[in-house]
Image (cartoon, rainbow, N blue to C red):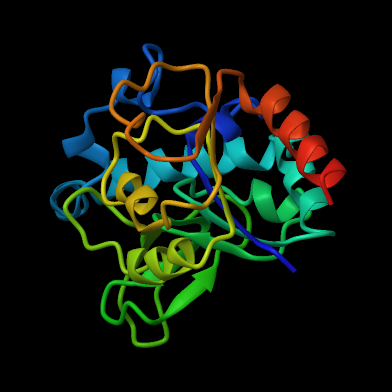
Amino acid sequence: MKKIVVLTGAGISAESGIKTFRDSDGLWEEYRIEDVATYDAWLRNQDLVLDFYNQRRKQLYECQPNAAHKALARLGEKFAVQIITQNVDDLHERGGSSRVLHLHGELKKARSTKDENLVYDIKGWKLKKGDLCEKGSQLRPHIVWFGEAVPQIVPAAELSGKADIFIVIGTSLNVYPAAGLLDYVPRHVPKYLIDPGEFSTIYYHQNLTVIKEKAGKGVPELVDKLLAEL
Protein backbone atom coordinates (compact mmCIF):
# COMPACT_ATOMS: atom_id res chain seq x y z
CA MET A 1 0.00 0.00 0.00
CA LYS A 2 1.45 3.37 -1.02
CA LYS A 3 2.32 5.82 1.74
CA ILE A 4 0.84 9.29 1.42
CA VAL A 5 2.14 11.92 3.82
CA VAL A 6 0.02 15.05 4.17
CA LEU A 7 1.22 18.30 5.75
CA THR A 8 -1.64 20.60 6.71
CA GLY A 9 -1.78 24.18 7.95
CA ALA A 10 -4.31 26.78 9.03
CA GLY A 11 -5.96 26.97 5.61
CA ILE A 12 -7.67 23.59 5.96
CA SER A 13 -9.21 24.56 9.31
CA ALA A 14 -10.21 28.07 8.25
CA GLU A 15 -13.02 26.67 6.11
CA SER A 16 -14.49 25.09 9.24
CA GLY A 17 -14.67 28.55 10.80
CA ILE A 18 -11.50 28.45 12.87
CA LYS A 19 -9.88 31.85 12.90
CA THR A 20 -6.33 31.79 11.57
CA PHE A 21 -3.38 33.73 12.95
CA ARG A 22 -1.66 35.19 9.91
CA ASP A 23 -4.51 36.47 7.75
CA SER A 24 -5.25 40.20 7.66
CA ASP A 25 -8.12 39.72 10.11
CA GLY A 26 -6.41 36.95 12.03
CA LEU A 27 -5.76 36.48 15.71
CA TRP A 28 -2.44 38.30 15.63
CA GLU A 29 -4.41 41.45 14.77
CA GLU A 30 -6.15 41.11 18.14
CA TYR A 31 -3.31 39.75 20.27
CA ARG A 32 0.44 40.16 20.30
CA ILE A 33 2.40 36.93 20.03
CA GLU A 34 4.46 38.03 23.03
CA ASP A 35 1.32 38.31 25.16
CA VAL A 36 -0.35 34.94 24.54
CA ALA A 37 1.97 32.51 22.78
CA THR A 38 5.30 32.47 24.58
CA TYR A 39 6.50 30.98 27.84
CA ASP A 40 7.37 34.46 29.06
CA ALA A 41 3.73 35.43 28.54
CA TRP A 42 2.69 32.45 30.65
CA LEU A 43 4.98 33.54 33.46
CA ARG A 44 3.83 37.15 33.18
CA ASN A 45 0.05 36.76 32.86
CA GLN A 46 -1.39 33.28 33.23
CA ASP A 47 -4.94 34.61 33.31
CA LEU A 48 -4.64 36.15 29.84
CA VAL A 49 -2.97 33.09 28.33
CA LEU A 50 -5.53 30.72 29.84
CA ASP A 51 -8.40 32.89 28.64
CA PHE A 52 -6.96 33.13 25.12
CA TYR A 53 -6.77 29.35 24.73
CA ASN A 54 -10.08 28.81 26.51
CA GLN A 55 -11.74 30.99 23.88
CA ARG A 56 -9.97 29.09 21.08
CA ARG A 57 -11.12 25.82 22.65
CA LYS A 58 -14.70 27.02 23.03
CA GLN A 59 -14.73 27.99 19.35
CA LEU A 60 -13.34 24.58 18.35
CA TYR A 61 -16.25 22.81 20.00
CA GLU A 62 -18.56 24.81 17.74
CA CYS A 63 -16.70 23.87 14.52
CA GLN A 64 -17.06 20.77 12.36
CA PRO A 65 -14.74 19.00 9.89
CA ASN A 66 -15.14 20.20 6.31
CA ALA A 67 -14.98 18.53 2.90
CA ALA A 68 -11.16 18.53 2.92
CA HIS A 69 -10.90 16.67 6.24
CA LYS A 70 -13.47 14.11 5.08
CA ALA A 71 -11.75 13.64 1.72
CA LEU A 72 -8.45 12.80 3.47
CA ALA A 73 -10.25 10.19 5.54
CA ARG A 74 -11.63 8.71 2.32
CA LEU A 75 -8.10 8.63 0.89
CA GLY A 76 -7.04 6.65 3.95
CA GLU A 77 -9.33 3.80 2.95
CA LYS A 78 -7.08 2.95 -0.02
CA PHE A 79 -3.69 4.40 0.95
CA ALA A 80 -1.57 4.43 4.09
CA VAL A 81 -2.20 8.09 4.91
CA GLN A 82 -0.17 9.84 7.58
CA ILE A 83 -1.18 13.41 8.41
CA ILE A 84 1.31 15.86 9.88
CA THR A 85 -0.52 18.97 10.98
CA GLN A 86 0.57 22.37 12.23
CA ASN A 87 -2.95 22.85 13.56
CA VAL A 88 -3.84 22.31 17.20
CA ASP A 89 -7.48 21.42 16.54
CA ASP A 90 -8.89 17.88 16.32
CA LEU A 91 -10.77 18.30 13.03
CA HIS A 92 -8.69 15.66 11.23
CA GLU A 93 -9.58 13.10 13.88
CA ARG A 94 -13.23 14.07 13.90
CA GLY A 95 -13.19 13.97 10.10
CA GLY A 96 -12.23 10.30 10.20
CA SER A 97 -8.41 10.26 9.97
CA SER A 98 -6.68 8.01 12.50
CA ARG A 99 -2.97 8.69 11.94
CA VAL A 100 -2.40 12.32 12.87
CA LEU A 101 0.83 13.81 14.20
CA HIS A 102 0.41 17.24 15.80
CA LEU A 103 3.55 19.34 15.43
CA HIS A 104 2.41 22.24 17.58
CA GLY A 105 0.41 20.49 20.27
CA GLU A 106 -3.29 19.89 20.84
CA LEU A 107 -5.80 22.46 21.99
CA LYS A 108 -8.00 19.99 23.85
CA LYS A 109 -5.11 18.80 26.01
CA ALA A 110 -3.13 20.24 28.91
CA ARG A 111 0.25 19.31 30.31
CA SER A 112 2.15 19.62 33.53
CA THR A 113 4.47 22.57 34.04
CA LYS A 114 6.69 20.27 36.11
CA ASP A 115 6.80 17.16 33.89
CA GLU A 116 6.13 17.66 30.16
CA ASN A 117 5.39 13.94 29.79
CA LEU A 118 2.23 14.33 31.87
CA VAL A 119 -0.47 15.23 29.33
CA TYR A 120 -4.19 15.22 30.07
CA ASP A 121 -7.44 15.61 28.15
CA ILE A 122 -9.27 18.78 29.15
CA LYS A 123 -12.87 18.17 30.21
CA GLY A 124 -14.97 20.85 28.56
CA TRP A 125 -13.40 24.01 27.17
CA LYS A 126 -11.99 25.68 30.29
CA LEU A 127 -8.52 25.24 31.74
CA LYS A 128 -8.32 27.20 34.97
CA LYS A 129 -5.82 28.36 37.55
CA GLY A 130 -5.71 25.68 40.19
CA ASP A 131 -6.03 22.81 37.71
CA LEU A 132 -3.06 20.71 38.76
CA CYS A 133 -1.19 17.67 37.49
CA GLU A 134 -0.68 14.61 39.68
CA LYS A 135 2.61 16.11 40.89
CA GLY A 136 0.85 19.24 42.12
CA SER A 137 1.92 21.77 39.48
CA GLN A 138 -0.32 24.03 37.41
CA LEU A 139 -1.49 22.66 34.06
CA ARG A 140 -0.68 24.72 30.95
CA PRO A 141 -2.05 24.47 27.40
CA HIS A 142 -0.47 21.56 25.53
CA ILE A 143 0.74 23.97 22.84
CA VAL A 144 4.21 24.56 21.41
CA TRP A 145 4.75 28.26 21.98
CA PHE A 146 7.06 30.51 20.01
CA GLY A 147 10.63 29.96 21.11
CA GLU A 148 9.96 26.43 22.37
CA ALA A 149 11.31 23.24 20.82
CA VAL A 150 9.12 21.23 18.42
CA PRO A 151 9.65 17.65 19.66
CA GLN A 152 7.57 16.04 16.91
CA ILE A 153 9.64 17.51 14.08
CA VAL A 154 12.07 14.57 14.10
CA PRO A 155 9.43 11.84 13.56
CA ALA A 156 7.72 14.17 11.06
CA ALA A 157 10.94 14.43 9.04
CA GLU A 158 11.35 10.65 9.11
CA LEU A 159 7.80 10.16 7.85
CA SER A 160 8.33 12.73 5.09
CA GLY A 161 11.41 10.89 3.90
CA LYS A 162 9.41 7.67 3.44
CA ALA A 163 6.52 9.18 1.47
CA ASP A 164 5.46 7.76 -1.89
CA ILE A 165 3.27 10.84 -2.39
CA PHE A 166 3.52 14.10 -0.42
CA ILE A 167 0.65 16.59 -0.17
CA VAL A 168 0.78 20.08 1.36
CA ILE A 169 -2.55 21.72 2.19
CA GLY A 170 -3.44 25.19 3.43
CA THR A 171 -0.10 26.42 4.66
CA SER A 172 2.06 29.39 3.69
CA LEU A 173 5.23 27.31 4.12
CA ASN A 174 6.63 30.27 6.05
CA VAL A 175 6.62 28.67 9.50
CA TYR A 176 9.73 26.69 10.36
CA PRO A 177 10.63 24.01 11.12
CA ALA A 178 7.43 22.64 9.54
CA ALA A 179 8.10 24.33 6.20
CA GLY A 180 11.39 22.46 5.94
CA LEU A 181 9.67 19.06 5.84
CA LEU A 182 9.32 19.36 2.07
CA ASP A 183 13.11 19.18 1.84
CA TYR A 184 13.09 15.67 3.34
CA VAL A 185 10.83 14.28 0.63
CA PRO A 186 12.80 12.36 -2.05
CA ARG A 187 13.11 14.25 -5.33
CA HIS A 188 11.35 11.61 -7.42
CA VAL A 189 8.24 11.57 -5.21
CA PRO A 190 5.14 13.30 -6.61
CA LYS A 191 4.33 16.39 -4.56
CA TYR A 192 1.14 18.44 -4.49
CA LEU A 193 0.52 21.87 -2.97
CA ILE A 194 -3.10 22.90 -2.48
CA ASP A 195 -3.46 26.57 -1.56
CA PRO A 196 -4.72 29.71 -3.33
CA GLY A 197 -1.74 31.80 -2.16
CA GLU A 198 1.45 32.83 -3.91
CA PHE A 199 4.55 30.73 -3.33
CA SER A 200 7.61 32.09 -5.09
CA THR A 201 10.11 30.08 -3.06
CA ILE A 202 8.92 26.48 -3.49
CA TYR A 203 9.05 25.98 -7.22
CA TYR A 204 12.58 24.57 -7.12
CA HIS A 205 11.12 21.31 -5.80
CA GLN A 206 10.96 18.60 -8.45
CA ASN A 207 7.71 16.81 -9.33
CA LEU A 208 5.62 19.53 -7.67
CA THR A 209 2.06 20.22 -8.82
CA VAL A 210 0.44 23.39 -7.49
CA ILE A 211 -3.36 23.43 -7.17
CA LYS A 212 -4.41 27.03 -6.52
CA GLU A 213 -7.66 26.25 -4.74
CA LYS A 214 -8.92 26.42 -1.20
CA ALA A 215 -8.74 23.13 0.66
CA GLY A 216 -12.48 22.46 0.54
CA LYS A 217 -12.40 22.31 -3.25
CA GLY A 218 -8.84 21.27 -4.07
CA VAL A 219 -8.49 18.35 -1.66
CA PRO A 220 -11.58 16.39 -2.77
CA GLU A 221 -10.56 16.90 -6.40
CA LEU A 222 -7.05 15.57 -5.78
CA VAL A 223 -8.38 12.66 -3.73
CA ASP A 224 -10.72 11.71 -6.57
CA LYS A 225 -7.78 11.84 -8.99
CA LEU A 226 -5.52 9.67 -6.82
CA LEU A 227 -8.26 7.10 -6.19
CA ALA A 228 -9.08 6.95 -9.91
CA GLU A 229 -5.43 6.13 -10.69
CA LEU A 230 -5.43 3.01 -8.51
Identify which residue is drawn at 42% across, 86% down: 134
**Residue lying farthest to the bottom in this orientation:** 135
Is 91 located above or below residue 39 in the figure?
Answer: above
Q: Position of residue 135 (x, y in %)?
A: 34, 87
Identify which residue is drawn at 84% across, 52% down: 230
| Left or right: 229, with 185 as reference point | right
Identify which residue is drawn at 20% across, 58% down: 148
| Left or right: 165, with 119 as reference point | right
Residue nearest the observer in this picture, 62 or 14: 14
Q: Position of residue 26 (x, y in %)?
A: 40, 20
**Residue lying farthest to the front in this orientation:** 188
Residue nearest the observer in this picture, 17 or 47: 17
Residue nearest the observer in this picture, 68 or 202: 202
Q: Position of residue 64 (x, y in %)?
A: 74, 37
- Number of numbered discs on residues: 0
| Left or right: 128, with 33 as reference point | right
